[in-house]
Structures are given as structure tokens and as C-alpha cells.
Amino acid sequence: VMTQTPASLSVSPGESATLSCRASEAVSSNLAWYQQKPGQSPRLLIYGASSRATGIPDRFRGSGSGTEFTLTITSLQSEDFAVYFCQQYINWPYTFGQGTKLEIK
Amino acid sequence: VQLVQSGAEVKRPGASVKVSCKASGYDFISLYMHWVRQAPGRGLEWMGLINPNGGMTTYARKFQGRVTLTRDTSTSTVYMEVRSLRSEDTATYFCARGGSIYGDNSDEYYQFWGQGTLLTVSS
């Protein structure tokens, strides 16, 4: 089971946001983060817990291993306000967290 | 790389639906294809995967016996069939390209997704 906290977060543009994801069992570094906007497919941000996907700006940073993971977004831009999901891909079923909604304050 | 899914569907409870995902721009048989669904306003739910090279499948326990994944290598298309539909199956269904069938699971994240297929189950 993947548990994301908080469920929602209100942050002002230009500030930073820290999103957490906890796994009920160790998943090594097989952890991805996705961003999803309304009506769109999810977009890969981070894989291997800390590697940025192609084209993802360096204000997105992933960290952690084992059971505790963090996605930090610095200097929030208007386009960053969305829902974020973590996913473990070490064992089937490849479960997702329930998501964190990042809202404009 | 492109994953193009079939269009929206409306079905009655008890019916079946088959959704397609046509892949292009890469070696179709060398990478797993996964399916993920999302109920309205809800999170992402992993359903299962297929190995296009041979057709081996793995399903989440919740979907075993009611969902079948198949593939057509001649058209680079994966199909997902759901039987005995109920209202709780109303969701957007996504295909997503996984990792190499020859490697470990370290690359089983989803760089590429289909555009989603909305399935509505209603009487």
C-alpha cells in the first residue's frame, strides 16, 4: 500500500511544496512520481525515486528509498498546480498512492 | 512513440467492452504494456499487464477472471476486455508503456500513456 500525504496542499506561486509517499513494504528505488491535470493522462516526472524524466525542469526533485519518499517542487509555477501520484513498481500489483492535490493559495 | 486508444463507450450493466491501444514508434514486442484505470474524481488503479512477445499476462487480483488482455502483433495493438460490467467500472481506462521484457523491473515506469478511454456503465 502506498500512502501519500497530505491529501491536499495550498501553496503560493514562487514558494516550495513537499509531497510525501510512504510504502507499506520496502520498494528499493522503484518509485515513480506522476503529475496529472484535469482531463489529461498522467505525466511522468520522476523515476527511480530521484531521476527526472525527459523534459522535466530541475525544480522537481525526488528523494528517498525503501519506504519513505519525497517530491519537492521549488519555485512553484502556475502550471505546477495539479494532482501528484506516486507509484511503486517493484512488485505486482504496481500500486499508486491516492494522490496529493496541489492548489494555489 | 504514440499510444492511441479507441473511443468512448457506453455500456449496460452485465455487458462486455473491448478497448484497444495501438502502439507506434517503438519495438512493440520488446516492452510490456500496462493498463490503469481512474474512476471519476478518484486515483489511479493498476489493472494488469501483457508481454506482447508471447502474450503472457498478469492481473491485479481484483480483476482476475473478469478482465482479459490480448495483443495483435501484426498491428501493434493491445486489447483490454472487461466482462460483466457494473456501474463501478465507470472510469477512464489508460494503456501505458512499461519496461523491457528482457530486463528486471527497474524500468517499469510509464513514460508514455494513451489518451484514455472513458467507459460509462449505466442502465
Image (cartoon, coloured by chain):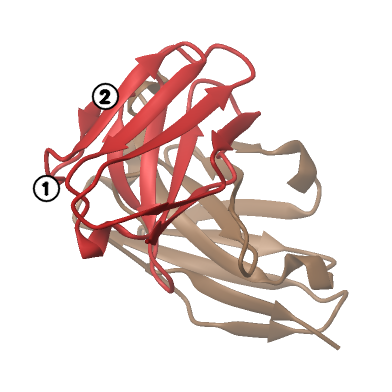
Say which element carries label 2: loop
Task: Tell me where residue B110 sits by quadrant.
Answer: top left
**Up-down relation of residue B103 to residue B12 (above or below):** above
Could you say where residue A54 lies in the image, as x and y percent from the top left? Answer: 14, 43
Task: Tell me where residue B66 sits by quadrant.
Answer: bottom right
Look at label 2 and name its amino acid. Ser
What chain is tagged by disc 2? A
Residue at 41%, 21% in the rendered image: A30
Number of on-image labels: 2
What chain is tagged by disc 1? A
Q: Nearer the viewer, residue A80 or B42?
A: A80
Crowd band around label 2 with a 10 angstrom C-alpha radius: few (<14), some (14–19), many (20+): many
Residue at 69%, 39% in the rendered image: B60
Say which element carries label 1: loop
Colour applied to chain B:
brown
| B28 displayed left or right of A96 | left
| B7 displayed left or right of B68 | left
Q: Nearer the viewer, residue A70 or B110?
A: A70
Task: Tell me where residue B59 sits by quadrant.
Answer: top right
- Which quadrant would the C terminus of chain A be assigned to in this image? bottom left
Could you say where residue B104 lies in the image, as x and y percent from the top left? Answer: 39, 17
Residue at 39%, 63% in the rendered image: A41
User: Residue tagged by mark 2?
Assistant: A50
- Which quadrant would the N terminus of chain A be assigned to in this image? top right
Q: Are marks 2 and 1 in contact (CB under 8 Å)?
A: no
User: Residue tagged by mark 1?
Assistant: A55
Look at label 1 and name its amino acid. Gly
Q: Does residue B95 appear anywhere in the picture? A: yes
Cα separation, mark 2 vs mark 1, equals 14 Å
**Residue A90, numbered circle:** none
Chain ID, red in image: A
| A44 displayed left or right of A52 | right
